[in-house]
Amino acid sequence: MILGTIFLVFAILLAFCVPIGGTIGIISLLAPYLEPGLPINAEFVFRHMVSAVDSFPLIAIPLFILSGLIMAEGGVSKRLFDVFAYIVGKRTAGMPAAVVITCLFYGAISGSAPATTAAVGAMCIPILVALGYDKIFVTALVATSGGLGVIIPPSIPFILYGLSSGESVGALFIAGIIPGIIVGVFLIGYAYIYCKRNGEDKEKIASNYNALRERGFLKLLKDSFWAILAPIIILGGIYGGIVTPTEAADISVVYSLIISIYIYKTLKWKDILRILTGAVKTTVPILFVVATATVFGRTLTLLQAPQQIAQTMIQLSSNKIVLLLMINVLLLFVGMVMDTTPAILILTPILLPVVKSFGINPIHFGVIMVINLAIAFVTPPVGLNLYVAHGMTGIPIMQIARKATPFIISFIVALLLITFIPSISLILT
């Protein structure tokens, strides 16, 4: 009964557009009034909010955000795209495929879906529209592919899941590599079907490809070499046990500054203050949600919510396949109405005991959760990538969402494959 009241209040506050951080903070303060005897008061809430952000692994989030912004301002996405357009651009659906591959690589730099969508979309959408592709299709492609930014490591949602679950962030990063590539392949697969069905302007594409050929592959590779090297340094350092994810985030910032200012010379030192301001504006809301969601999670623990929900789900079905399907549906629904950060921080302590009781590996479950929430970036009403894409093109959000539906279906098919074949996620860990 108490849990039902809490989640009802939660839904009402969200319906009245109370920010998610404020919503879960208010509920935590209301909990002792709903359940007298709970050791929760204002001092408890604020003390645990402070301790929640006093975390060494959490430092990686603002650092990866800062690194991604520096890379975006430094024009890294254009250099990546040119290389991939040279390699696959002449084939059927080659240019859309180059967009997806660029999102994969840029996601390995930024760790953020909206950042990947913005950086790749601002550069790719005008190019593909000029080559004769439908503008809404291209916008939907970029918005959906931007979700790869949170699957391919380094991933901010993986960091948050690691903090909530106690699992190794490095292991989660490594577990996301193959699933991210598989999702990318499925997105390219639908792009191929679309281009075969609707055709392409081969003359314009050939002209663009010839222009790249005139520059020469070695020249393109030289221009993009330092950008391609970024994820290799970050992941190689983590996977090789040389650095922790937080230390890798430090390296990422320094590396992005060096290549943007001294090698590519696309940034000046006077630009850094503006970029730092943007990083702070992006980071502060995330950290506030981390703080309040941690308190909310401890409140739910005191109410024994995880045990009650686990018992309910087990009563519904004792079959692991049915359980995983139910969890996927739940996560997809939650992602439609809630941002990724609070969704992970709230649901992880609730669902993790359930999946552990069924023998599901916590690292594998983390991958499942993040892929579900990556899909949510292109599902209204909250889908952030839709808003980013709308801001770049002016196309109504629902038009983008409708055009993105086949991409979302491709995403879900890949998700089901990854869900029921754990080795896809765990083979490298």
Image (cartoon, rainbow, N blue to C red):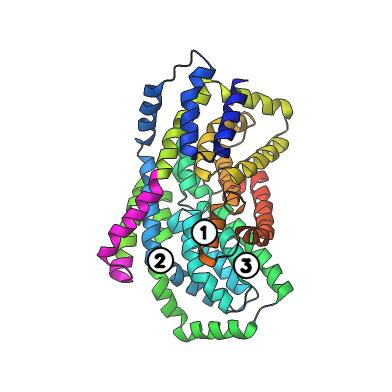
Name the residue furthest left: 269
Query: Does residue 241 appear in the picture of this structure?
Result: no
Callout 2, which amino acid?
Ala
Q: Is residue 4 above or below residue 269?
A: above
Callout 1, which amino acid?
Val
In front: mark 3 or mark 2?
3
Residue 348: name its quadrant.
top right
Q: What is the count of numbered marks?
A: 3
Query: What is the crowding at mark 2: few (fewer than 14 residues within 10 Å), some, or many (at least 20)?
Result: many
Q: What secondary structure is marked by label 3? A: helix
Residue 207: name its quadrant.
bottom right
Query: What is the crowding at mark 3: few (fewer than 14 residues within 10 Å), some, or many (at least 20)?
Result: many
Chain-order first, disc 3 or disc 2: 3
Residue picked out by circle 1 = 388
Residue picked out by circle 2 = 227
**Residue at point 60% right, 70% down?**
96
**Residue at point 65% right, 75% down?**
92
Callout 3, which amino acid?
Ile
Q: Is residue 205 above or below residue 380?
A: below
